[in-house]
Amino acid sequence: MTSDNRWARRGPALAALAAALARLAVILADGARFDDPDNYLPLARAVASGDGLTFKGRATAYRPPLYPVILAPLTVLEGDRPRVGLTLLHVALGAGTAALAVVAARRLGASPRRALVAGLIVAYDPVLAWQAKSAMTETLAAFLAALAVALAAGRRPVVAGGALGLASLARPSLLPGAGLVALAAAIFAPGDRRERLRRAGLLAVGVGGVMLPWGARNQLAMGEFVVTTTHGGYTLALANNEVYYRQVLDGPPGAVWTGPEQREWWDDVNRRMAGLPEPEADRRLRDEVVALARREPRTFARACLSRLATFWSPLPAAGVYGTTARLATFVWTAPLWIALALGLARREFRSWPGVAAPALIVGLTVVHAFYWTDLRMRAPIVPAIAVVAALATVGRRRS
């Protein structure tokens, strides 16, 4: 057996093991507490009890459905806070994400060793690994995004579209990226125009087939066909309001929006939206942002640029993280961004299926130019970043 064959056979397993150990270390170091700031566990308990996706007795689409549905059996087995189940779930998802990054890189032409690099980037990425300790959707969304990139090279576009649809049901901000993947297939996929459109259409069918039942559920439960969530208006307003602009955008360098002014803004939003159906509150908050952008277009544009800088910053916010964590993240991220830029210049990512990875990256980036943004928001596209970066110095395609 040649050296390359050994790497090819062992690469996914080695990456999976590295990711599993890294996430287990992060989870145990935090005492396996699994903070739940977005209330996914109460939703999971409601599903497990037969009440469906409800919160405080009311049907809700405020959070995406896939993660709490997956958590529901864990709450049956362990109760309100399934620490063992969450540990096993997040470790398994992290390991699977790293292994899929290896598979995706190999399918795009990376050598076995370079493909393993993609898996190790996923395994040790500080943003993605850190999220494993929280009951939040980044870990699941990253796994599904990696699965979609790996499946894009296959002969079943409907299945790849289904993975993109599931990723969007875990993290709705990935839906624009899914749309860009379908568009990229229509432009860059092999074959004549009819074949390209067929592939793009099948991808879209896969996405829609997975997401439409959620929209139908919301039509029945809340009277409106919501295919994502009713949370978008809030996250848009959270990053686009006069208080935020004054305190962060026009505040001192590195300012982070915390403290009494943020709480006052949140209390005001709750008062004004109290009693409204979720979809109506979502629309009103969105409309407020649109009105603000029209009144202050230059400020809104500056805020978008500021969010892009935050999303792609190699340094976490000084007001949230200590010096050691910030330095370690910078040392990891700066070379990775260089490799990403070099990888994006390769022809593999200007043709199908390689273009699927940049499409996901661009899609999520555009979303967070407008919506609330911090470093953890880029966690779901780490597998796509890893695949591109791993091919940065790949030469001739190897079998």
Image (cartoon, rainbow, N blue to C red):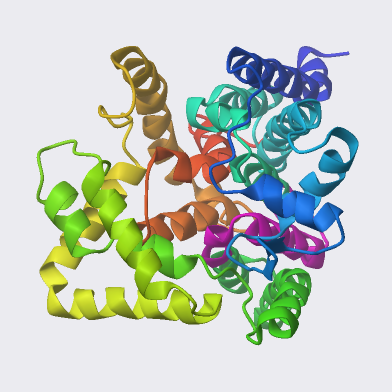
Question: Is 396 left or right of 264, judged from the image as shown?
Answer: right
Quarter of the rendering containing residue 192: bottom right
Coordinates of residue 59 in the picture (x, y in percent) = 69, 71
Q: Main secondary structure of the magenta part?
A: helix
State whether residue 394 is above or below residue 189.
above
Q: Give x and y (percent) for residue 57.
A: 70, 65
**Image: 381 above or below 292:** above
Q: Quadrant of residue 270?
A: bottom left
Viewer-proximal residue among 171 and 51: 51
* 65 horizontally vs 307: left or right: right
Residue 127 percent across, percent down from the top left? 49, 31
Instruction: Write the start and end of the magenta stretch as one range.
Output: 149-177
Does residue 316 appear anywhere in the picture?
yes
Give the left or right position of residue 192, taking residue 231 as reference.
Answer: right
Please tell me which residue lies in front, 215 or 311.
215
Residue at 29%, 32% (x, y): give it.
Answer: 317
Q: Is residue 151 visible?
A: no
Counting the numbered discs, the total is 0
Q: Is residue 144 magenta?
A: no
Magenta segment: does it hold 152?
yes
Above or below 25: residue 214: below
Q: Give me the residue at 58% from left, 33% from top.
A: 35
Relative image position of residue 20 (x, y in whole percent): 72, 21
Is 275 placed left or right of 328 in the picture?
Answer: right
Residue at 19 percent of width and 66 percent of height:
300
Q: Quadrant of the N terminus?
A: top right
